[in-house]
Image (cartoon, rainbow, N blue to C red):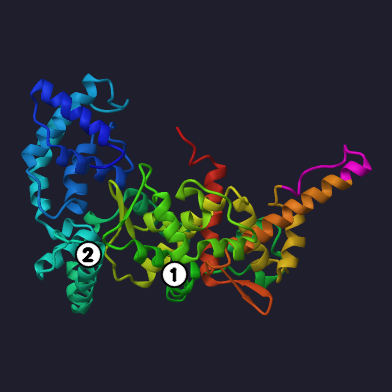
Amino acid sequence: MDDPYRLLITHAEHWAAKTRRPLDPELLETALSLRDSHDQRPGTSWPAGSVAELMTVRWPGHGPLDPPDVDSLVATLETFWRFLRATGRMASGSAEVKALTREAVRSTATMRERLSDPAAYGASKSLLAFGREIGISLDDVESVEDANARFAAVVEAWNALPQEERFARSPGPAGAGSKASAQLTEAANELLAGVDLTAYAAAHGMVDPDDDDDEEAIPVQDPRVVAAQVRRSGFQQRIHALVKWIGPAGRAVTQTGVLRPAVAREAIDELGLDDWMRTHLGGEPPTWRSAGEHLGLDRLYLAAVQAGLVEVRSTRVVAAAERVLDDQEWVLMGIGALVVARDRGEYAAPSASLLGVLLGLEFGESRTAEDLVAWWRRAPGNPYAGLRTDRLDAEQATAFAETLDSLSEAAVRWTLGYWRDTGIIHEERGRLHVTELGLDFTRILIRLHDLEEAGAFDDD
């Protein structure tokens, strides 16, 4: 039974026994785990529509291969909802028990249909179903090595299929991953086409309006080129190395869904992530207690989760089935990972410095790290550039200016180190330039910056 809901399910079992109501703890555990992993919805939150989502999308797409007893599932959920209401655990905004039960009953016919429809399966479930079809099941594995060997055999057989058959067997949009992934994909498609880099640079004084060449808009880059840069980047290669290390048998996670400390230490050692932090960030890795506190590991793990390369379940995280991606899918996955890296690194250096570095290299005269340090110190987007010293005496003003110089330089150098392995900037003979992947990512950064300035991501 999963850690986050073990106690809750145990209490529900005791309540069901006292009130003589039906409750299957395994069905309930699966239901809560599916909602938590794919929709980030707590087990106590049941707004209108969430039951149909669970029964007709999440369970068919990501639940066990063997279909559940749908009537028992409905009865178990109704008992659980009554338990939540009776004990005051039901979250605010949840529908009434009667309404939830009606929604469940209305969803039963569709659920039964979709449970047997491969088009409704997610990527991992599709591969597991194929494995069972060819006589390779993961239901009775005896060890991690056994699970990995069987999964590798399934993948090998899958890849041996003709391309047309693989496409025909691949999950459709109904079996797609989490809502977060779908929203990012939709946003990235919109953003790549919606931001004029040259116009933005001109509006911020980085392009000479009298220079006709500079006024030409920079087009969205060729996805074949960008996809190749994504695949070659050390960042993506480490993400996929982590996924391979996690494997189909999975690794243990905590209640918050991150790797357990001992497991995290194995991953850090296996992937050389302490060395990465020393080399790229210029210092010893700080002490950490939770895997989420290790920057080198966490940015890989979060990117893998967001891309659907791994699935966080009850007590384990498991590698999802490997999919064949076209170039545009590689671009979107790569940009999604970069967005995750941006958010994860925000605490150390504001994302404004990343945008400034990219725009300074593309539209300014900066070509080296030293150029960028000097340019960024006075750049309009630098939060340290506008701080005034005119009310300080000469000695105080000099000391304060030196502090601002140091902070500004540290932000640039940390930014260059942190992003060095991502493929957005290329260095050759000490000279830096923005790659095609970097140009497309800059569009995303600009749009995210505008949305954040407008408060689009503020909590209601």
Quick check: 26 left or right of 123? left
* Image location of residue 133, percent across then percent down: 9, 67
Residue drawn at x 51%, y 62% is 273
Q: Which element is circle 1 on?
A: helix
* Image location of residue 307, percent across then percent down: 37, 58
Residue drawn at x 46%, y 46% is 290
Task: State whether residue 132 is above or below residue 102.
Answer: below
Disc 2 and disc 1: Cα gap in Å?
23 Å
User: In the rendered image, which residue does mark 2 sit on?
Assistant: 147
* Image location of residue 76, percent across then percent down: 13, 34
Report whether residue 65 is seen.
Answer: yes
User: What's the magenta region?
Assistant: 384-397
Amino acid of disc 2: Ala
Q: Give whichever of discs 2 and 1 has the lower sequence position.
A: 2
**Dominant secondary structure of the magenta stretch?**
loop
Task: State whether residue 242 is above or below residue 39.
Answer: below
User: In the rendered image, which residue does mark 1 sit on?
Assistant: 237
Q: Residues within 10 Å of mark 2 (few under 14, many from 20)?
A: many
